[in-house]
Image (cartoon, rainbow, N blue to C red):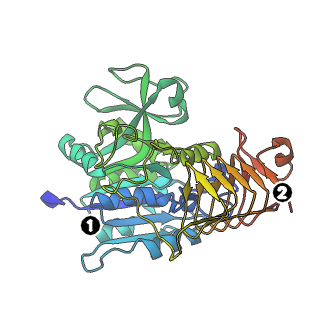
């Protein structure tokens, strides 16, 4: 970075992801597969690396084995240049306790900051689907002289009560930071739109350390970045907002520009996967100017035999579609779809097997799930509810290695 700016990336990846159960029954939320090839954590890491933020610590806690393994095997940086992406498990450095919140997670990992000696710290969440060039956010942060800059995305005001909401004046100075307010404030120039927090923050190191230490001494605090640290910074008039809509990602189009999805619920996760499969997708995985990186197994190409057909779908390597039809679906590597099966509007993860003549509609099947020959998933929701998890909008979810119809 020019001008003596040294940025340390801290990715918060310790959440349980209870609302994504059963996908999080055996893994941390940032390790949940997405889009056929990826894990959710790959999106924030790709954004940071593409922007040249090349020293990144990923703070983990719950069910972190697959996440730790993915990071260590996939995200290998040049040690010669002093770059790294490293998982950091909860170490109980401040006593025999787990993280009590996202701010406490950073406080307990203060050694990462003192060892790296950054001038600025990017604290980003690990479980959102988006492209962003954080260099532009850093430029605004440096120009404003703020202690913290929070990324905000414009959402309709009537939907903003589901988010942390940023109330800012016309200059971008944050006046209030409100957690899921019943009456969200609008923008100064557009009262029908509110700024929702993306959970991405840029701090000067001095400001973050000061805020964390003050927060640790507050017995009433919930020790959360949005609920505790941001209000503390706002009270001291040191917080500014960065408008995500102004972010220009190389290779983006008007259709997928400023795309950001919080996939914290099963229906949101399903909808974000479905955003990928149209001819002109709402979110374009094929932008070579800002790639999303991940680990790719050594597998043969996908194969379609005996009239197997896939339309408006993503199909991963090693998958065999045999005499069956796939429509509007995301199919991961190493899936087997047998003769006469029909799959529509579904997300199939690695190793899934769909038996002969089976029907799968509006479903999410986790790794190694098996649908028996002739079984129906997503056809009779009342029947499905007796055996499987069904989301609020009627998406049927099978967990890891689950068997249906057998």
> In this view of the protein, can residue 269 be seen by the observer?
yes
For marks 2 and 1, give the one nearer the viewer: 2
- Residue at x 86% of width, y 49% of height: 386
Quadrant into which the N terminus falls: bottom left
Q: Residues within 10 Å of mark 1 (few under 14, many from 20)?
A: some
Q: Please state the horizontal and vertical placement of residue 260, each as a whole percent of the image.
A: 44, 43
Q: Residue furthest left?
A: 3
The answer to whether 211 is drawn above or below residue 37 in the figure is above
Quadrant into which the C terminus falls: bottom right
Q: Please state the horizontal and vertical placement of residue 75, each as a whole percent of the image.
A: 41, 71
Q: Please state the horizontal and vertical placement of residue 263, each as a whole percent of the image.
A: 55, 47
Residue 307 versus residue 394: which sits nearer the camera? Answer: 307
The answer to whether 390 is drawn above or below residue 175 in the figure is below
> In this view of the protein, can residue 91 be seen by the observer?
no
- Residue at x 70% of width, y 45% of height: 395
Whether tag 2 and tag 1 are in contact, CB under 8 A, the answer is no
- Residue at x 52% of width, y 61% of height: 39
The answer to whether 200 is drawn above or below residue 86 in the figure is above
Helix, strand or loop at disc 1? loop
Res. 56 mark: none
Q: Residues within 10 Å of mark 2 (few under 14, many from 20)?
A: some
Going from the N terminus, do you reach mark 2 or mark 1 first? 1
Helix, strand or loop at disc 2? loop
Residue 349 versus residue 33: which sits nearer the camera? Answer: 349
Left/right of residue 169 with respect to residue 313 in the rendered view: left
Q: Which residue is mark 1?
A: 117
Q: Please state the horizontal and vertical placement of residue 319, each as a whole percent of the image.
A: 60, 67
Q: Which residue is mark 2?
A: 374
Q: Residue furthest bottom?
A: 80
Whole-angstrom CA distance, mark 2 to mark 1, is 60 Å
């Amino acid at each position: 970075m020019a001008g003596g700016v040294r940025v340390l990336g801290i990715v918060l990846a310790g959440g349980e992801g209870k609302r994504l159960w059963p996908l999080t029954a055996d893994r941390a939320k940032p390790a949940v597969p997405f889009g056929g090839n990826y894990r959710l954590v790959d999106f924030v890491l790709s954004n940071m690396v593409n922007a040249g933020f090349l020293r990144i610590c990923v703070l983990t806690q719950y069910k972190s084995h697959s996440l730790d393994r993915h990071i260590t095997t996939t995200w290998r940086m040049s040690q010669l240049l002093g770059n790294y992406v490293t998982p950091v498990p909860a170490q109980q450095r401040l006593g025999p306790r787990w993280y009590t919140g996202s701010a406490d997670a950073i406080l307990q990992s203060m050694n990462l900051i003192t060892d790296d000696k950054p001038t600025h710290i990017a604290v980003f969440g690990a479980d959102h689907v988006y492209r962003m060039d954080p260099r532009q956010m850093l430029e605004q942060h440096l120009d404003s002289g703020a202690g913290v800059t929070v990324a905000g995305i414009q959402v309709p005001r009537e939907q903003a009560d589901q988010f942390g909401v940023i109330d800012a004046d016309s200059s971008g100075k944050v006046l209030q930071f409100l957690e899921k307010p019943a009456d969200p404030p609008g923008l100064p120039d557009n009262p029908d739109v509110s700024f929702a927090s993306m959970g991405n923050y840029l701090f000067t190191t001095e400001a973050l350390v000061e805020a964390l230490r003050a927060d640790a001494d507050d017995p009433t605090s919930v020790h959360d970045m949005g609920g505790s640290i941001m209000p503390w910074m706002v009270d001291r008039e040191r917080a500014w907002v960065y408008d995500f809509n102004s972010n220009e990602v190389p290779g983006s189009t008007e259709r997928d520009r400023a795309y950001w999805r919080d996939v914290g619920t099963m229906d949101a996760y399903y909808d974000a996967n479905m955003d990928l499969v149209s001819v002109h997708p709402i979110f374009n995985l094929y932008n070579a100017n800002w790639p999303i990186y991940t680990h790719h197994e050594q597998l043969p190409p996908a194969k379609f035999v005996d009239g197997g057909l896939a339309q408006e779908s993503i199909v991963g390597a090693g998958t065999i579609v045999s005499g069956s039809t796939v429509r509007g679906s995301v199919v991961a590597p190493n899936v087997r779809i047998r003769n006469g099966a029909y799959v529509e509007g579904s997300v199939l993860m690695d190793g899934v097997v769909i038996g002969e003549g089976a029907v799968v509609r509006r479903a999410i099947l986790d790794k190694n799930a098996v649908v028996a020959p002739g079984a129906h998933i997503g056809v009779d929701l009342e029947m499905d509810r007796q055996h499987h998890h069904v989301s609020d909008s009627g998406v049927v979810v099978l967990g890891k290695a689950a068997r249906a119809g057998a």
